Image (spheres, rainbow, N blue to C red):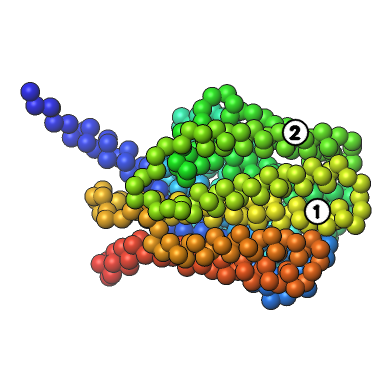
């Protein structure tokens, strides 16, 4: 007996559902392009003038570099890739509107303005730039939160995503207030303690919370492994957010209890890492076409190693009396967390997401005919190997140089990392060649 042909309505509905879950291309790649430019600029500044960024971190040039990494590289990458991860890993499409491009412009112009005004030490302009960045961020996270509430994402993942977005807005508001405080006194308390609170809202509350929530779905794709399920996934969100609230409050007010809340944050990290260990014990057979060694998985593992080191440094800092060596450990803590964990995790995710984005874009533009592209084979495996080696070698050298104020080590580490990121950028463009060719041919056809 023949199977009945699907009705035209069914075919139309199926096609519409497929179209809705094809990730957008232009907006994510605009964010990713700005992210790469930001990280290259940050490392170039450090490599060319290592003495200018050495010493205690709270000086204008180092703050400019830090914001190139935190806002330019990490946050812009997240804002771009969430549009790809949403439909592919979470079944959550976030349709692109014209307002999203205005939000992108606000983020790019605002971030660039902040970095410029830090460098020039013109603090009134910095406040306006920070406010512009916040406008773009606010629009973006409202779009994401709206889609999280509209689709059936597993509740633990949804909680991580919503908390991350809320924390990002709070970090932005605190940042704007700190910028205004440079011109007129509006924020009570110790200025440096307020900066620490702002930094942890952004790094722990926004970037790390998002990395943990999305990681529960992305890491199984990277390894590959079974997807963790159950109530255990709530633990990281509850512990991270509880610890973060207490940590920010005690840092900003000077109240006791900082160590207790730092332990709570560390417990949240441990809860996440326990699920990562579970994934490694529930591996799935990788696709036969995936090359070995798998540098995406290696880079993710290397980033998670730095997460462990960052957590140890943070606990040691909170538990220790202030001294010369704690200021050195503070610098180490920042480099390990921002570049070693978060910055490197972005690279690992790109190695998996860029081939997927290229495939789905070609799939959609060819009328939903599967393209002759692989989502597993990287086009230039030796380039990826060299870049990974640069991260492995350059990170500890740069971190040690900044912590011990060894200018020569800072320069060497920055040049090695700059080479690695340059290779990552070249490889990213290489992976996107099919998409760029299709875009060029379409523009020629419309002329």
Pinpoint residue 373: horizontal percent, then vertical percent: 31, 55
Which residue is rendered at x = 66% and y = 68% of the image? 414
| Quadrant into which the N terminus falls | top left
| Quadrant into which the C terminus falls | bottom left
Locate residue 237 relative to residue 117 in the image: left or right.
left
Locate residue 272 relative to residue 100 in the image: left or right.
right
Give the spatial CA distance, label 2 vs label 1: 19 Å
- Of the pair 323 and 193, the residue shown nearer to us: 323
The residue furthest left is 1
**Residue of label 2:** 264
Locate residue 298 relative to residue 439 in the image: left or right.
right
Q: Is residue 382 visible?
A: yes
Q: Is residue 74 visible?
A: no
Q: Residues within 10 Å of mark 2 (few under 14, many from 20)?
A: many
Which residue is rendered at x = 75% and y = 44% of the image? 312
Tell me the element at label 1.
helix
Pinpoint residue 396: horizontal percent, then vertical percent: 69, 60
What label sits on residue 26 in the rendered view? none
Locate residue 413 relative to residue 345 in the image: left or right.
right
Pinpoint residue 49: horizontal percent, then vertical percent: 73, 75
Toward which corner of the image does residue 132 lie, by quadrant? bottom right
Which residue is rendered at x = 33% and y = 53% of the image? 374
Placement of 248 over or under 137, stated as above or below: above
Placement of 30 over or under 20, stated as above or below: below
Pinpoint residue 424: horizontal percent, then vertical percent: 51, 63
- Of the pair 344 and 22, the residue shown nearer to us: 344
**Residue of label 1:** 330
């Amino acid at each position: 007996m023949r199977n009945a042909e699907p009705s035209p309505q069914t075919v139309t509905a199926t096609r519409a559902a497929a179209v809705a879950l094809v990730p957008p291309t232009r907006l994510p790649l605009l964010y990713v392009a700005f992210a790469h430019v930001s990280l290259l600029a940050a490392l170039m500044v450090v490599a060319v003038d290592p003495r200018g960024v050495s010493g205690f971190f709270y000086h204008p040039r180092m703050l400019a570099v830090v914001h190139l990494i935190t806002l330019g590289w990490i946050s812009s990458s997240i804002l771009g890739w969430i549009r790809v991860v949403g439909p592919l890993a979470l079944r959550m499409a976030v349709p692109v509107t014209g307002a999203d491009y205005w939000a992108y412009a606000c983020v790019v112009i605002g971030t660039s303005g902040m970095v410029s005004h830090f460098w020039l030490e013109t603090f009134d302009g910095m406040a306006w730039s920070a406010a512009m960045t916040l406008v773009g961020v606010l629009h973006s996270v409202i779009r994401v939160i709206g889609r999280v509430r509209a689709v059936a994402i597993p509740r633990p993942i949804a909680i991580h995503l919503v908390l991350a977005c809320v924390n990002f807005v709070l970090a932005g508001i605190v940042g704007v207030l700190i910028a205004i405080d440079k011109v007129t006194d509006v924020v009570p308390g110790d200025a440096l303690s307020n900066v620490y609170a702002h930094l942890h809202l952004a790094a722990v509350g926004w970037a790390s919370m998002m990395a943990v929530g999305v990681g529960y779905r992305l890491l199984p794709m990277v390894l590959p492994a079974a997807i963790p399920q159950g109530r255990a996934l709530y633990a990281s969100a509850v512990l991270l957010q509880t610890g973060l609230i207490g940590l920010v409050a005690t840092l900003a007010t000077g109240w006791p209890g900082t160590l207790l809340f730092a332990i709570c944050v560390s417990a949240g990290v441990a809860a996440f890492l326990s699920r990562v260990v579970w994934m490694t014990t529930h591996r799935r057979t990788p696709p036969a076409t995936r090359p070995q060694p798998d540098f995406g998985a290696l880079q993710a593992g290397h980033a998670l190693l730095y997460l462990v080191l960052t957590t140890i440094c943070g606990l040691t800092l909170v538990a220790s009396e202030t001294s010369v060596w704690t200021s050195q450990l503070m610098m180490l803590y920042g480099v390990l967390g921002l570049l070693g964990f978060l910055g490197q995790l972005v690279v690992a995710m790109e190695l998996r997401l860029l081939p997927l984005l290229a495939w789905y874009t070609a799939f959609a533009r060819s009328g939903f005919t599967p393209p002759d592209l692989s989502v597993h084979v990287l086009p230039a495996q030796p380039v990826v190997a060299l870049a990974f080696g640069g991260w492995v070698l350059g990170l500890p050298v740069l971190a040690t140089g900044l912590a011990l104020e060894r200018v020569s080590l800072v320069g060497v580490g920055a040049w090695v990392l700059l080479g690695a990121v340059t290779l990552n950028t070249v490889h990213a463009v290489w992976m996107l060649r099919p998409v760029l060719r299709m875009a060029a041919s379409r523009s020629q056809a419309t002329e």
